[in-house]
Image (cartoon, rainbow, N blue to C red):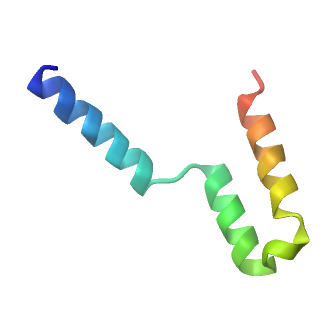
Amino acid sequence: MDGLTWITYVGVIVALIIFPGPVALLCTSHGLRFGRATGGLFMAAGGSLIASSP
């Protein structure tokens, strides 16, 4: 793999790890506010379903 391609790839991966998307932020804030017992799994599944729809 070319050095520039590798550096670009690593930069994109680091940016994706550092800056989570809106669904990840929603799940994190909901989990911190209400805990695990209030349907966080259903919220995560709904967020994934919405994100994957065209």
User: Residue furthest toward the left?
Assistant: 3
Quarter of the image that includes the C terminus: top right
In-image side of 48 versus 24 (left or right): right
In-image side of 32 versus 12 (left or right): right
In-image side of 13 versus 49 (left or right): left
- Residue 50 drawn above or below residue 30: above
- Residue 9 drawn above or below residue 13: above
- Residue 41 drawn above or below residue 30: above
- Residue 48 drawn above or below residue 17: above
- Choose between 15 and 10: the one closer to the eye: 10
Image quadrant in which you'd find residue 31: bottom right
In-image side of 40 versus 10 (left or right): right
**Residue in view at x 36 percent, y 47 percent:** 15
Image quadrant in which you'd find residue 33: bottom right
Q: Position of residue 22 (x, y in %)?
A: 63, 51
**Residue in view at x 42 percent, y 52 percent:** 17
**Residue in view at x 87 percent, y 74 percent:** 37
Quarter of the image that includes the N terminus: top left
**Residue in view at x 72 percent, y 29 percent:** 52
Q: Position of residue 49 (x, y in %)?
A: 80, 36
Q: Position of residue 11 (x, y in %)?
A: 27, 41
Question: Number of numbered discs present?
Answer: 0
